[in-house]
Image (cartoon, rainbow, N blue to C red):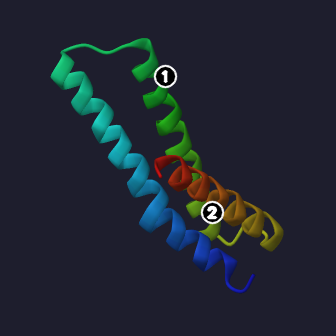
Amino acid sequence: MKKCDLKLKELLEETVIPDIDDRLDELFEEIADNKNSTEEINEEIKELQELKDAFKEVLSDIETRSLDKEECEELYNDIQEMLNDTSEDED
C-alpha cells in the first residue's frame, strides 16, 4: 500500500477519532438526560477512551516514523474492516 502512513493518519484523524468523540458525546448526553449512569455505559466510555488513546498513540508513531510498513498496512486494513462491519450493522 503506497503511503500507508498518510492514509492511516487521515483515516484516524478524519473518521475514527471523530466517530469515537461523537459516541462519547452521545453517552454523556444520555447520562445527563437520565441523571445517572449504568455500569454498561461506564464500561463503554472506558473502552472508547482506551481505544481513542491507542489511536492517538498510533498517530504519534506515525509522526515519529516508528510505525513500520507492515504494521501500518495491518492496522489500516483492520480499521477499514471494522468500519465496514459497523456500516453493515447499521443497514
Say above or below: 58 vs 37.
below
Say above or below: 28 vs 7.
above
Residues 5 and 57: in front is 5
Secondary structure of the residue carrying tag 2 is helix
Kindly identify the residue that appears in the image at 53 percent across and 32 percent down.
47
Is residue 67 visible in the rendered structure shown here? no
**Residue behind mark 1:** 43
Residue 73 x/y as whole percent: 75, 69
- Where's the N terminus, which quadrant? bottom right
Amino acid carrying label 1: it is Glu
Q: Quadrant of residue 36?
A: top left
How crowded pointer 2 is (Cα within 10 Å; few <14, some 14-19, many 20+) is rated as some
On screen, residue 31 versus residue 76, left or right, reads: left
Say above or below: 45 vs 67.
above
Q: Quadrant of residue 3?
A: bottom right
Kindly identify the residue that appears in the image at 59 percent across and 76 percent down.
7
Measured in 3D between alpha carbons, the distance from the residue under mark 1 to the one under mark 2, in whole angstroms, is 24 Å
On screen, residue 36 versus residue 42, left or right, reads: left
How many numbered markers are drawn? 2
Residue 88 x/y as whole percent: 55, 53
Residue that lies at the very extreme toward the bottom in this rendered image: 2
How crowded pointer 1 is (Cα within 10 Å; few <14, some 14-19, many 20+) is rated as few
**Residue behind mark 2:** 80
Front tag of 1 and 2? 2
Kindly identify the residue that appears in the image at 51 percent across and 73 percent down.
10
